[in-house]
Structures are given as C-alpha cells and as structure tokens.
Image (cartoon, helix red, strand yellow):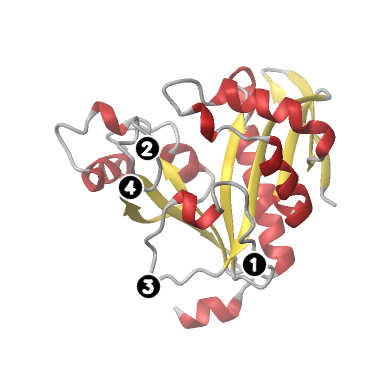
C-alpha cells in the first residue's frame, strides 16, 4: 500500500499532506469532491459512483490514490493498467477505462492509464495534482511499466473553436501563446503530448477532444532501445 506524508507551504505556513491509497471508507467524500471539481455543464453521470469506486480498490488498489490536507480528503487520482500500442493511439475514454469501472484492468499491461484526477478548488494552489501525479510515476517505476498515459481535456478550447482546429489550439498552448487549465497543468507534470483524439469524451468545453499525453518510465531501458 502506498502512503507518503510530508509538508507543502501555503505562503510561509507548512501544511500537512498525506498521499495514500483510498479505501471504501472514502467513497462518499470522493463522490462529493467529484461534484465540486466537475460542476455542470460537465455531465453529472460521469461523476464516480460507488460501484466504480469499489472496482478501483478491489481490481487495482495500487492505482487508487487520494490526498489529504491536514487530515481532510482533498482529491484523488485513479488509474488502471492497459496494453497500449503507440501505432494505434485512437480510443475513447469509455473504451479504455470501461466507463470508469476498470473491469478491463490488465495486470500484464505495459501502461498505467489515468482514468481521472480531481482536486478540490480551494486546495489547488498547493500543487496537489502534480504531487499525486508524481506518486503515480512511482507506481509506474515500481511495476516496471513503459509509461503513464492519459487523455487530457481541453476545457479552454471551446472559446477558440470557431477560429482554430484542436491541433492549432494545442500548438498555441505548446508555444505559450495560450494557457489551458488541464493541458498546461499536465505539461507542468512532465507529461508529453502525443496526438489529438477526437470524440474522446462527452465534454462540450473541449468540443469532445482530448490530448493524449504520456510520461515515459526513465528506468525502462528496453522501451528506450525500441524508440
């Protein structure tokens, strides 16, 4: 089981942080966090339900992480293992995560795929999302996987969709001409864009697009030799 306790600073004040595996006792709080992190027009049916959460902790508990701030649950990060072929990147969120139920978790897969990340808005200045992502990198290394992978929403794209394609929007974000709340965050987490996936998720803000982004395991020399 994963558990890491440390401090971050809010201005000059140290704040106690704990990243650990979430369990059944956390389910109600996790669902509440989802509702605050993904308010309407994000579809409420995409918030976690208890059947999904039960599968997370029973099928792949190593991929079920949460973060506490001074003992209060403040966010979560969930993943599953899949067999990913870089030359066939196209997929939807529903297909690759089994609609969040992860019944397709493959213990022998080569990739840890991020299903969801969420942090309460009031705690986002503490960098908790990046800290949880780094903890999941530890899981990738421990299990000897090739990469961490996931589709990043593009919630700022709808503001520009009439003037540019999704690829042009990503290019503008990469140049620093635009900032996107999710893609820019993932770049700061050392994730690297691979491609745009159309019709990835029912997400009006992203015009249903996502950026497939990875973090390669730097200790997987076999994967690097194949590049």
Q: Position of residue 30 (x, y in %)?
A: 70, 30
Q: Position of residue 155 (x, y in %)?
A: 38, 32
Q: Residues within 10 Å of mark 2 (few under 14, many from 20)?
A: many
Label 4 to label 2, Cα distance in Å? 12 Å
C-beta proximity under 8 Å, tags 1 and 3:
no
Mark 1 or 2, closer to the camera: 1
Upstream in the sequence, badge 4 or badge 1?
1
Upstream in the sequence, badge 1 or badge 3?
3
Does dot 2 land on a helix, a strand or a loop? loop
Label 3 to label 2, Cα distance in Å? 23 Å
Q: Which residue is mark 3?
A: 87
Upstream in the sequence, badge 3 or badge 2?
3
Does dot 3 land on a helix, a strand or a loop? loop
Q: Residues within 10 Å of mark 4 (few under 14, many from 20)?
A: some
Mark 4 or 3, closer to the camera: 4
Label 1 to label 2, Cα distance in Å? 28 Å
Mark 1 or 3, closer to the camera: 1
Q: Residues within 10 Å of mark 1 (few under 14, many from 20)?
A: some
C-beta proximity under 8 Å, tags 4 and 3:
no
Q: Which residue is mark 4?
A: 199
Q: Which residue is mark 2?
A: 154
Upstream in the sequence, badge 4 or badge 2?
2
Q: Position of residue 27 (x, y in %)?
A: 75, 32
Q: Which residue is mark 1?
A: 106
Upstream in the sequence, badge 1 or badge 2?
1
Does dot 1 land on a helix, a strand or a loop? loop
């Amino acid at each position: 089981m994963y558990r890491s306790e440390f401090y971050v600073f809010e201005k000059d004040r140290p704040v106690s942080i704990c990243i650990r595996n979430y369990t059944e006792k956390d389910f109600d709080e996790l669902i509440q966090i989802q509702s605050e992190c993904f308010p309407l027009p994000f579809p409420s049916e995409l918030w976690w339900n208890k059947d999904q959460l039960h599968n997370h902790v029973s099928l792949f508990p190593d991929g079920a992480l949460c973060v506490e701030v001074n003992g209060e649950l403040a966010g979560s990060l969930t993943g599953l293992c899949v067999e990913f072929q870089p030359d066939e990147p196209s997929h939807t969120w529903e297909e690759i995560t089994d609609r969040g139920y992860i019944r397709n978790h493959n213990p022998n897969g080569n990739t840890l795929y991020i299903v969801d990340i969420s942090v309460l808005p009031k705690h986002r200045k503490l960098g908790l999302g990046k800290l949880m992502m780094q903890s999941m990198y530890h899981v990738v290394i421990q299990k000897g996987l090739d990469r961490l992978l996931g589709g990043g929403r593009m919630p700022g794209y709808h503001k520009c969709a009439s003037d540019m394609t999704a690829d042009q929007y990503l290019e503008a974000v990469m140049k620093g001409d635009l900032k996107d709340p999710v893609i820019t965050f993932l770049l700061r987490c050392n994730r690297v864009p691979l491609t745009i996936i159309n019709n990835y998720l029912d997400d009006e803000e992203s015009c249903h697009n996502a950026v497939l982004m990875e973090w390669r395991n730097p200790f997987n020399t076999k994967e690097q030799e194949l590049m």
